[in-house]
Amino acid sequence: MTSVHLSPGLSREQALTHALPVVVDMLEHGDGPYVDEGVLADLIALHWLRCEGGSWSMTAAGARVMQSLSRRGELRPEAGGAFAPSSSTLHPPVITAA
């Protein structure tokens, strides 16, 4: 399994912005336990994600962050409307083996 930690050298909000697509993907695939609890708490505090009844969802504000990343070429759309980090992303989140 993998875990997500924020990239060093960025402001907390910048690092969270770049981590959002990876975190969303991990939550969609049931890998939420491998996301740092502080990262999830910050994404909730920014109103980018919400958890209701044990189900995670992206808010409208989170969707706007994803669209902004896509417009800047830092995400590429994939089949089914999902997004993945682009190979040109300058500061991807640090993903490590757990």
Image (tube, rainbow, N blue to C red):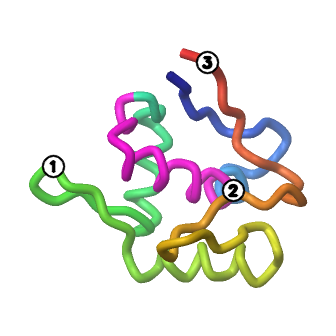
Task: In the displayed orientation, state which residue is furthest to the left.
Answer: 53
> As drawn, is 30 to the left or to the right of 26?
left
Q: Secondary structure at mark 2?
A: helix
Tags 3 and 1 in contact by the CB under 8 Å rule? no
Mark 1 packing: few (<14 Cα in 10 Å), some, or many (20+)? few
Mark 3 or 1: in front is 3
Gap between marks 3 and 1 measured at Cα: 25 Å
Where does the magenta region start and end? 16-33
- Where residue 33 sits: x, y (%)? 35, 30
Q: Residue lying furthest front in this view?
A: 79
Residue linked to disc 2:
18
On screen, 39 above or below 78?
above
Q: Earlier in the sequence, mark 3 or mark 1?
A: 1
Q: Give, as a three-letter code, the residue at label 2.
A: His
* Residue position marked by numbered label 3 in the rendering: 97
Q: Magenta segment: does it hold 26?
A: yes
Left or right, 77 with reference to 35: right
The residue identified by callout 1 is 54
